[in-house]
Amino acid sequence: MKAAKPVFVCQECGVQRPKWQGKCDDCGAWSSFVEERPFEGAMGGPTTHRYAMPGSQAPGAKKYAEIEASKADRITTGIGEFDRVLGGGIVPGSLVLLGGEPGIGKSTLLLQAAANFANAVGPVLYASGEESEHQIKARGDRLGVGDAPLYLLAETCIERILEEIGRVKPALMIVDSVQTVFSLKFQSAPGSIGQVREAATQLLFTAKGHNIPTFLVGHVTKDGNIAGPKALEHVVDTVLYFEGERHHSHRVVRAVKNRFGAVSELGVFEMTGAGLRPVPNPSALFLAERPTASPGSAVLCCLEGTRPLLVEVQALVSTSSYGQSRRMAVGIDQNRLSLLLAVLEKRAGLHLVSDDVFVNIAGGMSIEEPAVDLGIVAAVASSTRNRPIPQGTAVFGEVGLGGEVRGVAQANLRIREAEQMGFTRIVLPASNMEASEEMGKAELVGVRSVGEALDVLLS
Ligand code: TYD
Ligand code: MG
């Protein structure tokens, strides 16, 4: 047998080259190539079937109509908010990647889910390369795990983990984290893209072949990507991100890819002394400390996945004491803020050139959807004119460059949430009025332009 040739793999994008190079010609990253030499002999024997899909016995294509629809019975994690981001529970045989910064609560959430699952469904195997069994047990005691059939394995060799899966035959598998796992087939260090991809692929085939749902924990790199991002996100069925600020107790789990459910679905938790507690009514949490009758505060109805959410947009406009005025955005896109300030300047006659403008989404949330625009505009104008937005008023709507207020998706859901939270007046795009007429409890005010919206909100 010929000795396997080394390959050099870019750790940023996964592209393979026969020689080392300083700059990746594919993604432009510098010094990102690492040699990944297959272990001599490990790849011996027929390799053609290594990636054959297990469970597909009969070769050849099948007729669509003859394929039985597999009923994707969901298995609950016992944690309502977690089920929600997963699209209604765990799908048998699915591979789920849970990413997030260190210390955000990934291991805690999965240990809680594992304990529930073990009690309700069957044995769970929790392989950890980050903590010893004792450390996990100490945490489990705080979470009240009890004597569920939960098996802990402090192991990082994927071949050994697969052996244990064969022995324990778990109903759920957890690998914490995928970056610590290595395969004997490669010589490169754990966490390199080849190792991460190999571990994920092997676990994928085990998950699909034996119908064992599997969770992978993934660390997030400085720029916010799961290390080896492209390689992993394609392999797994579902990608969840754990977000939140260290200094806030609430945490948000967001689905960014889901083969079995809606994306950008959101689950909200609060970190307590006894683990993560689901927050079924996040609007109340995000509005809890809102100042009343204070200029620069607007309540926005935004939508995360299928879930409407009320958040507070705060703005502070103050005279700039230095030559250049500053614009700062937390929780919204900085460019979006610049654009909206220009619209306010040009279309609503606000003079902001010599002012510092700070905008913040209270509670550490971050919002990407365009419906946030009207909330930002309202909060900034309210602070500029030093006039509060009347209590009980909520807003949503996209703002265009012409100063027009544009309709947004799912107006009904937003209105219902605002009504449930006790808001009595909702300022929304005029084009969303038709779809929303029949509701009734709150007064709906449709606006066509930024000027009109500010008249309604601040007169
Ligand atoms: P952890 O799940 O270890 O984070 P990750 O796996 O994402 O790195 O969470 C660690 C943090 O959570 C740690 O700072 C302590 C805190 N924590 C609590 O506040 N309460 C608890 O019951 C537990 C288990 C952890
Ligand atoms: Mg952890």
Image (cartoon, helix red, strand yellow):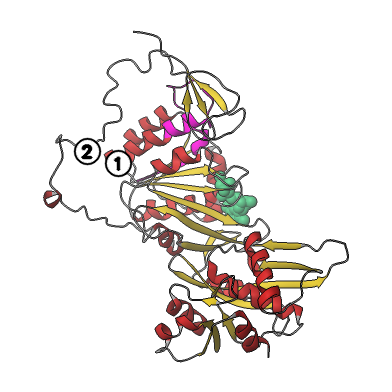
Label 2, secondary structure: give it.
loop
Q: Is residue 449 above or below residue 330?
A: below
Q: Are marks 2 and 1 in contact (CB under 8 Å)?
A: yes
> Which label's residue is closer to the chain start, 2 or 1?
2
Which residue position is annotated with label 2? 55
Quick one: label 1, few (<14), some, or many (20+) residues within 10 Å? some
Q: Is residue 241 above or below residue 298?
A: above
Residue at figure coordinates x 38%, y 13% from the top left: 41
Residue at figure coordinates x 31%, y 46% from the top left: 93
Q: Is residue 437 above or below residue 65?
A: below
Left or right: residue 76 compared with residue 243: left
The amino acid type, in three-letter code, at marker 1 is: Lys
Q: Check if residue 179 falls in the magenta segment.
A: yes
Residue at figure coordinates x 62%, y 60% from the top left: 333
Quadrant of the frame with the N terminus:
top left
- Nearest the eye: 327 or 68: 327
Q: Position of residue 348 (x, y in %)?
A: 68, 79
Magenta-drawn segment: 172-199
Residue at figure coordinates x 33%, y 34% from the top left: 167
Which residue position is annotated with label 1? 208
The amino acid type, in three-letter code, at marker 2 is: Gly
